[in-house]
Amino acid sequence: MPTPIPMLDLVAQFQTIEHELRAAIEDVLRSGKFILGPQVEAFEQEIAKLCGAPHAVGVASGTDALLLALRAAGVGAGDEVIVPAFSYISTADTVSLLGATPVFSDISPDTFNLDPSQLESRITPRTRAIIPVHLFGQPADMERILTVADSARIVVIEDAAQAIGATRGGRPAGSFGEFGCLSFYPTKNLGAAGDGGMILTSSLEAADRLRSLRGHGAVAHKYISEEQGWNSRLDELQAAILRVKLRHITEWNAARQSHAARYDKLLRAVPGLVLPRLAPGSTHVFHQYTVRLADRERVQKHLAAEGIASAVYYPVPLHLQPMFAHLGYQPGSMPRAERAALEVLSLPIYPELTPGQIERVAGAVATAVVH
Ligand SMILES: Cc1ncc(COP(=O)(O)O)c(C=O)c1O
């Protein structure tokens, strides 16, 4: 069996920054401060700077970032929130957790992101917000989405969980809408050693509200709650680890981009394979390198036999998830998302991947697709 190539190699990453990480962890252990302390504050400021947002609020996960942003946007029972039909489940289940209804909208086949031309038809008097997702690391068409949202007075909450460091028209993902949500789940481009998330906002008032919501709705006094919130705190150890990794994120994202370019070159001529497409004016941080192909199962089996991991993000579009069966969407209602779910295949991509490994993956894909 050839040496395995995983989707991601966090042990290899650890080895490149082991000394920095050990020092940062030890500093926190010696400080005796573990929740919402100086590491979290410094990390919030550093992320705000990287993402071009005036304020950043650290929370317990990307899912909580979405939940709290939706709460701060006033979303609740009876409201509708437009979300793409093709994303991770958090984008939609946070909406329904607050008693609101996710209204699914189809994607652009080239980028897998929301198709702005379909948005207007989804807006009703109950639409309160829209959540564009920057899927796989490429920003959605924010100019057109903001135009639609502004004219309908709808709040925009970006789900930038997969796109930290990506830009569109020179602007960082997460800095376009009223809120931008990040996830530091370990497999993300900037991943913690556990869970973590962040909300970006340009409004000081919103940032203050989010700080209150993440601490049971307390404002001036820790034990006096002004409104219902919950515990969604980022801890000092995660913030310290993330601060170390943040020093490398630009270089890591650049490595992903160069690996993607290498895959593009090696796979360009493979018949029937559709490679990732970059929208003009966008930079893509390749959280995933996702191709489209027919007969995916056979190709995955061949890759597995060669010791090469691959993954399907996502096999079932959101509108057809069992949890949303009560909303009554039928197969065929979001044809592009449904087709993507059948055709997508993500290949290993991570900064430490070597040119030789990329050649092995590309060679195995080419052989499997052609035969
Ligand atoms: C697009 C998207 N949205 C939201 C999330 C939720 O983030 P978390 O797992 O940190 O709760 C994730 C990642 O898991 C994601 O990929």
Image (cartoon, helix red, strand yellow):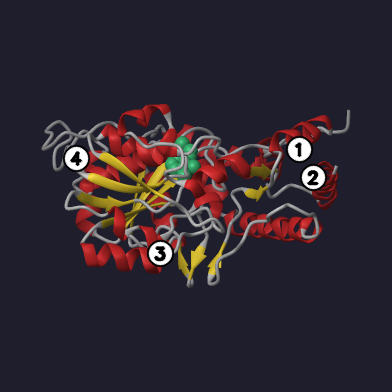
Q: State the CA–CA distance, disc 4 to disc 2.
A: 47 Å
Q: Which mark is residue 369?
A: 2
Q: State the CA–CA distance, disc 2 to disc 3.
A: 35 Å
Q: Residues within 10 Å of mark 3 (few under 14, many from 20)?
A: many
The quarter of the picture where residue 203 lies is bottom left
Q: How many marks?
A: 4
Instruction: Say what secondary structure mark 4 lies in.
Output: loop
Instruction: Say what secondary structure mark 3 lies in.
Output: helix
Q: Amino acid at mark 1?
A: Val
Q: Amino acid at mark 4?
A: Gly
Residue 5 sits above or below residue 43 on the image: above
* Tags 1 and 2 touching, CB below 8 Å: yes
Q: Is residue 266 left or right of residue 8?
A: right
Would the CB of label 4 be found within 8 Å of ligand 1?
no
Q: Which mark is residue 142?
A: 3
Indicate the quadrant containing the C terminus: top left, top right, bottom left or bottom right: top right
Q: Is residue 241 left or right of residue 115?
A: right
Residue at the image point whose x is 38% and y is 36% from the top: 60
Instruction: Say what secondary structure mark 1 lies in.
Output: helix
Q: Picture coordinates of residue 117 (x, y %)? A: 39, 63
Q: Residues within 10 Å of mark 4 (few under 14, many from 20)?
A: some
Q: Earlier in the sequence, mark 3 or mark 4?
A: 4
Q: Which mark is residue 76?
A: 4
Q: State the CA–CA distance, disc 1 to disc 3.
A: 34 Å
Q: Earlier in the sequence, mark 4 or mark 2?
A: 4
Q: Earlier in the sequence, mark 1 or mark 3?
A: 3
Indicate the quadrant containing the N terminus: top left, top right, bottom left or bottom right: top right
Residue at the image point whose x is 33% and y is 37% from the top: 94
Q: Which residue in the protein does label 1 denote?
A: 299
